[in-house]
Every structure is written in C-alpha cells, then in structure tokens.
Image: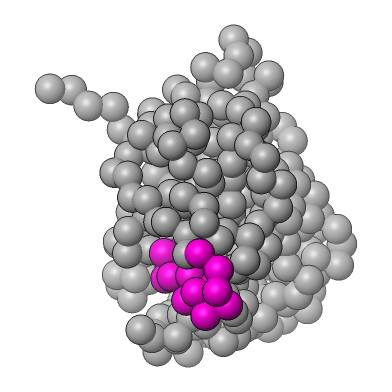
Amino acid sequence: MNRMTIPALLTGALLSLGAAAQESPFDLSPDQPGREHVEPNPEAIAAIPADFPFVTPGKLTVGSNPAGGPPLTAYATDTRTVVGADADVALLIAESLGLELEIIPTAWADWPLALQSAKVDAVFSNVGVTEERKEKFDFATYRQGLHGFFVHEDSEIQSIAEPQDIAGLKVVVGIGTNQERILNKWNEINIEAGLPAAELIYYDDEGTKLLALRSKRVDVMVQPNAQLVFIAARDGDFRSVGTLSAGWPERSDVAAPFRKGSGLAEPVSIAINGLIEDGVYLRTLERWHVGEEALEQSQVNPPGLPKF
C-alpha cells in the first residue's frame, strides 16, 4: 500500500486552506521571496577557528529534519527544498559567517551521528539543550523552548500561566513527554494547595486530539508551541491561552549543536546576537508566527534540562 510521507501530508493539509499558496499563513514556496538576507559579520567571522574542518569549504552544512513540519522545518511545495523558521535562521547565520548555506535533510534520530561523523557542521532542528547532550556536543542557543496551551475557539478558558490554572481540567498531553513531566509536577503543587488535579488524557493521533477538543471531551491540549501554532493557522478554530518553558521551573532554550570542542558554537552565537541587535532575527521568527519564541541573547552552553 502506498503511503504519503509526513512532509507531504503536512504540505497538503496546509495548502488546503486556500486555492493559492499566498493565501496560506505560511509561505511554503521553494523560492521564499519574503526571506531576509544579511551582510557578513566581521566579528563572527574572526571567531571561526582557522583550522575548523567545514564539510565543504565555503559552506555551512547543517542537518535539519523536515518531518518536523511548519513553521519550524518542512519541505517546500517542490518536496525538495527545506524551508521554515529554523532554515531561515540557519541561512542568516551562514551569511553572517560569510558562507553559503547547505541543508542536509536529517531524521531526528540521526542528527547526533551526522554531527559526530562530520556529515554536517551543525544541526538546526529544534534541539533542546540538556545536560546529557552537553557532555557530547556544544550548543549556541537561537530560540526559546516553549510548550503551548491551546483550546478550541469557543472555550471559556482565557489564560493558563501557573499550576492553579489547570486545576480540574482535562488536558491532552503526550505520554512520556517533557510536557507530561511538568504537568505532573503542577498536579502535585495543586494537590498540596488543596486544589483538584488536572486529568491528563492520552491519545495516539492528532486527529483524535483535535476532535476531543472540538467536542469538549477535553479542555486543553499541550505540546510544543510551534506545532500548535501550525495547527491553529491551518484549522482556524483553535487559539493559544499561554506558553510554558520547556525547562520549567527553569528555562531551557533551543540551540544548534556542534561537535564538542570544535569552536564553532562561539562564532555562531556572535552571529545570532548580531542578528538580534539588527532586528532581522525577530522579523524572521515573526514571519513564521513564532516571534514569542525569540531570545534576547544567544548563549553558548547554557544550563540545560537535567538528567532524569
């Protein structure tokens, strides 16, 4: 039996919003006319180690997982070109370093090996900083790691920002996820405060989750914020009522990983901070509807999620 690929399914779902691609809230065309460009950043270039072994001289070769889907990383309508917020940020960094960008589609499970075997120089694929990963890789942060709380448009829920806001609600969450870990902590806090715990609901597929929200069998859905931004834009009947740091109660950001000790994290971080100062960084994230995930400053190897 023939099966559509995940990228094809995502692209098809998005284009069904309108007959013309330009009517979509996301531009998935391969030429990306709205994409911004920058001039080389001398400070960032000067920080590149003289002996750094780029996969291809003159290019920044990055791995990225198009199966992640828009708005972060997806295949364009030509089913070959990788587009999205992560691809745009990678392009701006490459240009800041005076390099040409080359994106190698890389499955999520394969990015560590792709880095360690020097098939790519860096990875831009929504990778969160963790203490365990820092033992093998260096990181330069480029976005906040946020989970989103989304409800159906006619829900009475207006805001979820702290544990008491989910007391007594039915919440759809992925089993074994970081979001589940956080919500279980929130339930512990609520129970200690004499409030009812939220009921965590688990479904295997997205369609069932969304149907449960529409039929009011559940109250709210929690998963990575960017995924929910896409769903809300695609379907038009869901809305955000809050976000949550992936590292709650601490902060955990999304970063580009590099081979440990390679020295490339520092120039990339300098490049990102130049983009932030210039304003092009925020404009780029806003073009993909994830401006709320913008960083105030890029960091090299910040504290990450602890080992569990």
Relative vertical location of residue 85 with respect to residue 235 in this rendering, above or below:
below
Task: Name the residue located 32 percent from the left edge and 39 percent from the top edge.
Answer: 205
Q: Is 207 colored magenta in this rendering?
A: no
Tell me residue 279's x, y (percent).
Answer: 85, 58
Q: Residue furthest left?
A: 1
Query: Residue 92 sits in which quadrant?
Result: bottom right
151, above or below 146, in the image: above
Q: Main secondary structure of the magenta part?
A: helix
**On screen, 103 above or below 196?**
above
Say whether residue 12 is visible: yes
Query: Where is residue 20 drawn, in percent x and y?
Result: 63, 13
Kindly tell me whether residue 91 is visible in this rendering.
no
In the image, what residue occupies the spot 46% across and 50% down?
A: 170
- The image's colouring method is one colour
Placement of 82 over or under 133, stated as above or below: above
Q: Nearer the viewer, residue 177 or 117?
A: 177
| x then y, percent, for residue 85 | 62, 49
Front residue of 166 and 66? 166
Q: Nearer the viewer, residue 180 or 37?
A: 180
- State the image coordinates of residue 94 (x, y, percent, origin top left): 64, 61
For the point 63% across and 37% down, the residue is: 155
256 with respect to 20 (left or right): left
Per the rendered image, the range of residues in magenta is 178-196
The quadrant the N terminus occupies is top left
